């Protein structure tokens, strides 16, 4: 039956650690290459890894998994967005804003998919 009536407390220290690991990976990829596709994939890689781990443990509901994956993704993507947007000239700003909006939409879709993967199966009694 698992923890039917017991609500687990979030371990925000652990999720922050994984967010920092994702930020380091994304920063490394952003410094190595300026391609937005690789930066997006490196930011999502940590979220997918955590979603697979959540699927394995089977203790996460959809909303909890969505909250955790969005938290980790925000930490993972923040340094790369700062590295790309801040040093951009005024001519490049509209293109970077468009890329940032597309990234945000892809990140939201990715977080929802990861939360669907990570949610625990229904328990039939």
Image (spheres, rainbow, N blue to C red):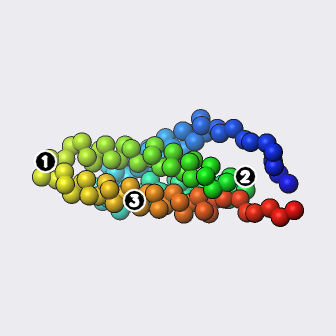
Question: Mark 3 or mark 2, which is nearer the start of the sequence?
Answer: 2
Q: Is 25 left or right of 90, judged from the image as shown?
A: right
How crowded pointer 3 is (Cα within 10 Å; few <14, some 14-19, many 20+) is rated as few
Question: From mark 2 to mark 3, how far is it between C-alphas?
Answer: 27 Å
Instruction: State the SS at label 3.
Output: helix
Q: What label sits on residue 105 in the rendered view?
A: 3
Q: Is the residue 123 above or below the residue 14 in the image?
A: below
Q: In the depicted view, which residue is nearer to us: 125 or 45?
A: 125
Residue at point 36% right, 57% down?
Answer: 103
Instruction: State the SS at label 1.
Output: loop
Residue 83: x and y in percent read 29, 44
Q: Is 3 left or right of 77, judged from the image as shown?
A: right
Quarter occupied by residue 101: bottom left
Quarter occupied by residue 58: bottom right
| Circle 1 residue | 90
For the residues bearing labels 1 and 2, Cβ distance under 8 angstroms = no
Q: Is residue 23 visible?
A: yes
Q: What label sits on residue 31 in the rendered view?
A: none
Question: Mark 3 or mark 1, which is nearer the start of the sequence?
Answer: 1
Q: Is residue 33 visible?
A: no
Question: From mark 1 to mark 2, how far is it between C-alphas?
Answer: 47 Å
Residue at point 68% right, 52% down?
Answer: 60
| Circle 2 residue | 59
Residue 41: x and y in percent read 43, 60
Residue 78: x and y in percent read 39, 44
Residue at point 19% right, 47% down?
Answer: 88
How crowded pointer 1 is (Cα within 10 Å; few <14, some 14-19, many 20+) is rated as few
Question: From mark 1 to mark 3, how far is it between C-alphas?
Answer: 24 Å
Q: Is 2 left or right of 105, judged from the image as shown?
A: right
């Amino acid at each position: 039956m698992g923890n039917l009536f017991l609500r687990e407390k979030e371990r925000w220290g652990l999720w922050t650690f994984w967010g920092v690991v994702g930020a380091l990976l994304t920063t490394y990829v952003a410094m190595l290459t300026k391609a937005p596709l690789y930066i997006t994939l490196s930011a999502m890689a940590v979220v997918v890894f955590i979603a697979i781990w959540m699927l394995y443990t089977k203790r996460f509901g959809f909303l909890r998994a969505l909250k955790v994956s969005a938290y980790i993704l925000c930490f993972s993507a923040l340094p790369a967005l700062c590295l790309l947007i801040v040093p951009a000239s005024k001519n490049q700003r509209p293109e970077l804003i468009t890329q940032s909006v597309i990234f945000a939409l892809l990140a939201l879709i990715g977080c929802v998919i990861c939360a669907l993967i990570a949610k625990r199966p229904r328990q039939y009694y």
